[in-house]
Amino acid sequence: MSEKRKKQKKRILRPEVIVWFIRLTLIISILLNCVVVFLHIFQDRHIERREVLEASSDQFELISLAVLALILTFLPNYIERRQNVHFPQVLELTIILFMYSSIYLSARYELYYRFFWWDDLLHTLSGVITGFIGFLFVYRLNHKYTMNINPLFIALFAFTFSVTFAVFWEIFEFIMDVNFGTNMQRWNLPESTILMGKHYQGSGLRDTMSDLILASIGALGTSVVCYFLYKNEKRKALKIMRETFPEKAPNPDKSS
């Protein structure tokens, strides 16, 4: 491969290019589904509003999910500007890809129903991602005091941070199912569905525990990586932490 092609390939695979490609696909999806809704409205002037809503329900769902996913792709940039945080590019891209896949792609292609392992994969990845966020967050909490910390403590913090996030997410799913009749905890799945546990335990309990266990496995894997990274490559780990949470420059007006 020539040097020119290598440079072009690197430009295409740059994180910001991938992120804008994701945003473009979401915008196109929103526009196309809006066109379908308008066609349903104007194809027959005598059609009732209820019939229009029923015919366009799938489009309304995809539009709302695409809008939500599009807004969330800007969330890391918003946090960076408001909180003086600079996420590592790999972590930022992974977070955006995760939100894009879990919110939009899952609904657009019905991945939860086509692949029994899709939900398990997402929960495992959520444990990995939040584990690394917890690892970086140690610096934000403790750097003003000391970073001479036992690597085991940092790994334990990353693990508990990630698992706590998973627990609160399952509580959120439970509240949504109870109050709005959603099926986030998949409480009405057939007995033949592949889940951990026994059939008599019910699909809702089995789905919740599967999610927590898999998120914990992802968090455990991350905590092990964080342990050895901080133990054997402490300077490299601290550099990543400092770049993620840089010190704010002193304001000369306040100091005078």
Image (spheres, rainbow, N blue to C red):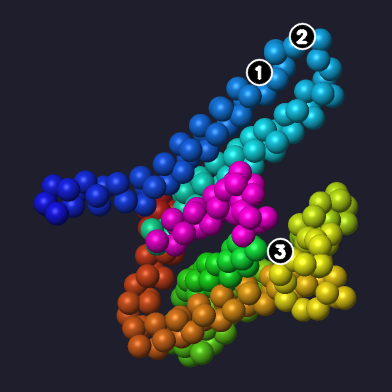
**Quadrant in the picture for residue 160:** bottom right
Mark closer to the observer (3, 1): 1
Number of residues whose C-alpha sits closer than 10 Å to that of mark 2, classed few (under 14), some (14–19) or many (20 or more): few
Tell me the element at label 3: helix
In the image, the segment drawn in magenta is 90-115
Q: Rounded to the nearest whole Å, what is the CA distance between mark 2 and mark 1?
A: 11 Å
Q: Which mark is residue 39?
A: 1
Q: Which residue is mark 2?
A: 45
Vertical comparison of 56 with 66: above or below: above
Percent position (x, y) of residue 235?
A: 32, 80
Q: As drawn, is 64 to the left or to the right of 246?
A: right
Magenta run includes residue 15 = no
For marks 3 and 2, give the CA distance.
44 Å
| Badge 2 amino acid | Arg
- Most extreme residue toward the left is 2
Residue that numbered label 3 is attached to: 169
Classify 10 Å Cα crowding around label 3: few (below 14), some (14-19), many (20 and above): some
Quarter of the image for the N terminus: give it. bottom left
Residue positioned 72% across, 72% down in the render: 195
